[in-house]
Structure formats: C-alpha cells, structure tokens
Amino acid sequence: MADTHPTSNAGFEDLLEANRSFAESFEYAGFDGIAKAGVAIVTCMDSRIDPLGMLGLSAGDAKIFRNPGGRVTPQALEALVLGTHLLNVQRILVIPHTRCAMASATEAELHERVTASAGTDSTWQPFNVVTDQLATLADDVAKVRTHPLVPESVVVGGFVYDVDTGLLTQHA
Ligand SMILES: [Zn+2]
C-alpha cells in the first residue's frame, strides 16, 4: 500500500535550505518563550496578515493564535488562559479582517467550492462562517473578557484589520 504521508524532504527542499540559512544567525537559543511585549493576538490564517509586523513587534514579543476567521474558539481561550498566567500576556487583541472568506461566503458556498476541489463530499467538515463580522467580534471579545480564568487586569480589544490599507480599527 502506498504511503500517502512519506517522511521525506521531497517538496520541502527550498524551505529547508532557507531554514539552514536562518539557523546560521539564530538569535533565540535559550529564550524562555514568554511574550516579551506582553501581547497576545488572535487572528485569521489569511496570508495577507503579518501579525507581528502590523503591530511593530518582532519574534519573541507576542503569543499568536490563528484560525480561519480569527475566532475566539475553545482552543483560543486555552491559549489565552495559558498566556495570561504563564507567559506574560497582559494585552489581548482579537483581529478579524476585511475581505475574509469566512465572513463573505456562506457555509453552503464554501462546501460547494471545497467539494468541487476535493471531488468528494465535504459537508461533514464544519466551516464556521461568520454572518455579521462586527457582532461576532463583539461576542468573541466578550468571551475573553468574561472568562473566569482571564484576569481582570488584562486589557482586551477587538479590531478589524484592513487588508488593503494595513490599518487596524478598534470595534470592541
Ligand atoms: Zn480570513
């Protein structure tokens, strides 16, 4: 039987070569993994978003949790609780963005497109689309603010990132 997930470098050569260059000037050895700037970011997986760059931060400064839509899921809350208690997080930004596929298509439309691409039914795979992005952002920020294990001293904000201008606008 063919192994569909071979453990080999095939297909990753360029990335591993880049990694060797990266490691030549590696600066983070021995770093303890706290958020040096005290920041945690929940944002979308969208490749147009540079979560550190858009806030003037660098590697080591922030804990970053990404998923489709930039949603405050149970796993995001898990990350934020750990971040606030163990990793120096004092400010949390929840950042969905303009022109997000998760906020501009219906779940049926996404299933139609994925089913066409996969050539097999995709409807068993949930896609958690957002119908009202700002209302959802307010709900997601409230989930963080009211979480019993997120300290009241932690500052929580909800922002929309404009993928065409690079600007953040606070909404919650
Ligand atoms: Zn998105």
Image (cartoon, grey):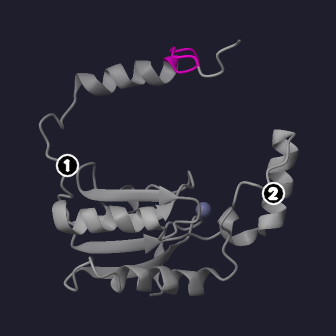
Amino acid on which disc 2 is placed: His
The stretch in magenta equals 6-13
Q: Mark 1 near mark 2, Cβ–Cβ under 8 Å? A: no
Quadrant location of the C terminus?
Answer: bottom left
Residue 53 at what x, y percent from top left?
37, 56
User: Would you say 169 lies left or right of 101 here?
Assistant: left
User: Would you say 134 lies left or right of 119 here?
Assistant: left
To which quarter of the image does residue 76 belong? bottom left
User: Would you say 52 lies left or right of 149 here?
Assistant: right
Q: Is residue 39 visible?
A: no
* Residue drawn at (51%, 14%) of the image: 8
Vertical position of residue 110 compared to residue 60: above or below: below
* Residue drawn at (50%, 66%) of the image: 166
User: Would you say 142 lies left or right of 70 here?
Assistant: left
Amino acid on which disc 1 is placed: Gly
Q: Nearer the viewer, residue 61 or 124?
A: 124
Instruction: Return the residue at label 1.
Output: 33
Q: Is residue 27 magenta?
A: no
Label 2 element class: helix
Instruction: Return the residue at label 2.
Output: 111
Residue 102 at what x, y percent from top left?
67, 66
Tell me if mark 1 has few (under 14), some (14-19) or many (20+) residues whose alpha carbon lies within 10 angstroms of its own.
some
To which quarter of the image does residue 41 belong? bottom left
Label 1 element class: loop
Q: Nearer the viewer, residue 111 or 100?
A: 111
Label placed on residue 6: none
* Residue drawn at (38%, 68%) of the image: 77
Q: Is residue 107 visible?
A: yes
Q: Nearer the viewer, residue 59 or 43?
A: 43
Residue 49 at what x, y percent from top left?
50, 57
Ligand number 1: quarter of image: bottom right
For marks 1 and 2, give the CA distance: 38 Å
